[in-house]
Structures are given as structure tokens and as C-alpha cells.
Amino acid sequence: MNILIIENETYLAQSIASKLADIGHECHITSIMDSNTKNTHDVILISSSICGDHYEKFIHNHADAIIIMMISYVSDDTVSKPIKAGAKDYILKPFMIDELIRKIEHYRSCKDIATKINFYSSYFNFIEKELNTPTPFPYTPPFVIKSNSQRSADIYAMKYAREKNIHFEFYTLKEDRYKNILKNPPSKSTIIYITNLEELKRQERKDFLEIALKYSMIISLVSTDKIIFPQIIDISHIPNNHEIGAEILSVKEYEKAIIAKFEGRYPDIELAKKLGMSRKSLWEKRKKYGISRKK
């Protein structure tokens, strides 16, 4: 990191710079607090002995930097006022260099985390505007989100989490990992978001939903199938044009894709009925497209 050391004790400044340079930081030393200094430093260490009356303007001009005050005593002028102006912390002279490094690393980690949070929050806000996701219903888990796409269900679940200020553990019914929930029941405070209920066969689905009643679960179902559950949020009627792929499939390609996706989920009679064809026709198309029947 690029570190600026503002200190009028030359020996102390050089000692700090030398030890920080040993662990890979680039250090610059000055004894003048210049408000016109370019805001190019990641960290600024300021000795309170040379703050003067214009430290507030300097701190404001370097709001993106991690500013740590190096002080000889604690007072409103050396600690409270600089921190109110935007400084992150202080360290009392004389100090161990390891303690200074610990503070720098701590605030760098905090800054990295804040940057990531802002990135994902901005992405979520962008996606949320792209989809016609309704305002979450006043339900408490467990409940099922019935949607026409996994993306819509996920956005709804995340919107619910943000509005309720809660956090999830994530599972998918495509993997056996969800069975750990049954072996090791989570605490009452743990909220689980579990996707792909449609992957389970009818009886498995029914059994799982009975178990889900015991836990704080939010479950997504991307299907038009009817299910029985006390609380179901049905957003499948809301059109989301952004879920349509950029490529237009031919009727044959669409048939092949749908059969391959759903042939393991429904019995032949039910799948044929949903596709508007006979069971024999389904068998012929499966043979034509080279799709093996999943057991």
C-alpha cells in the first residue's frame, strides 16, 4: 500500500517507514500537512503535534484513505475531533510497530469488505430492477416461493432477506447435502433458503415439505405443479421477459430440451400430457433425439 507519514520527528518517521517498507509498503514522509496534497495514498499516519487548525479540511480531502492519528495524549483535540472529521483510529506514542501494522491491516480488511458489499448490493439493485419482483409478503418462514424461473425466485428471496434484515444458509435439492439438515437439525435462529423443489419426485416432495414445516425454511419451486403447504407465495404469473434467452430455439430443439430436462421428473404419461402428445409419441421422440430414460 501507498502510505504517507506526516511527522515532524524525523527519526520516528524514518523508523516507521523502514519497518513498513520491510513488509512491502511504499512510504512517503513529510512534516507538513498540506491540504492540496493529491489524494493518492491508501493510508495516512498523522502526528497530532503538527495537526494545527486545518486538519479537518485535510481529512475531508483524503476521505478515501485510512487515516490514523499518532498521538502523545488522549483529548478531544487529538482523538474525538479528528475521528468525527473522518479519521479511522489513533495510536498512542510510544507504540509497537506491530500494533500499528495490526490497525492498518484491520482497516484495510474493513475497506475491502465494504467495497465487496457495495459491489454486490449494486448488482442486486440492478437485477431487481430488471425483474418484476413484487414486494415480499408479510410471511415468516417456512414458506414456498412458486415461480416461473429460478432467477425470479432467488431475487424474491434476497429481497425478502434485505427487507427483514436476515441471512440465509443455502442448499439445493439437486445435491444430497440438504440431507444434513435432517441429520443435524439447525438452530431455531437459522434460516435456510433451499432451491429446486421441482427436482424431487412427487412423494419425495410431499415428504420433504412435511419435514420443512419444522424449520425456518424458504423453498423455491419452479413449476406449475400444485403442492399443499400452509404458506405459498405464487409469483409464477408475473412475466419476466428477461428470463427468455437471446437465442430462439426451433420447435424440435425446444422439444428435445424440454424432454431432456423433465423426463426424469415426471412419469411418461404425465410428461406426455404436459407436452400435448401421446405416450407413444414421447417414446418415439426420445428415441429420435437419443435421450435415455432416467430411472
Image: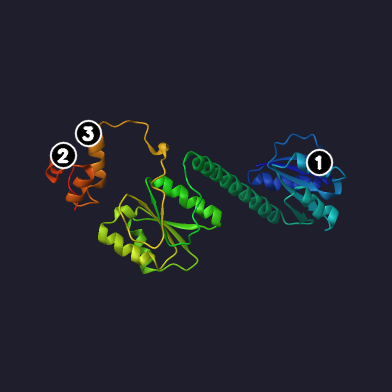
State which quadrant residue 39 falls in: top right
In the picture, the disc for residue 285 is: 2
State which quadrant residue 203 falls in: bottom left
In the picture, the disc for residue 252 is: 3
Q: In the image shown, does 201 or 240 lie closer to the viewer?
A: 240
Label 3 Cα neighbours within 10 Å, binned few <14 / some 14-19 / many ≥20: few
Separation of residues labelled 2 and 3 (CA atoms): 9 Å
Q: Is residue 120 left or right of residue 29?
A: left
Label 2 Cα neighbours within 10 Å, binned few <14 / some 14-19 / many ≥20: some
Describe the element under mark 1 as helix, strand or loop: helix
Q: Amino acid at mark 3?
A: Lys
Q: Is residue 164 left or right of residue 80?
A: left
Separation of residues labelled 2 and 1 (CA atoms): 74 Å
Residue 174 seen in the current view: no
Q: Which residue is mark 1?
A: 57
Query: Which residue: 85% across, 42% down?
Result: 54
Query: Which residue: 54% across, 57% down?
Result: 164
Q: In the image shown, does 38 or 100 lie closer to the viewer?
A: 38
Query: Which residue: 26% across, 31% down?
Result: 250
Q: Amino acid at mark 2?
A: Lys
Query: Which residue: 48% across, 68% down?
Result: 188
Image location of residue 174, percent across then percent down = 32, 53
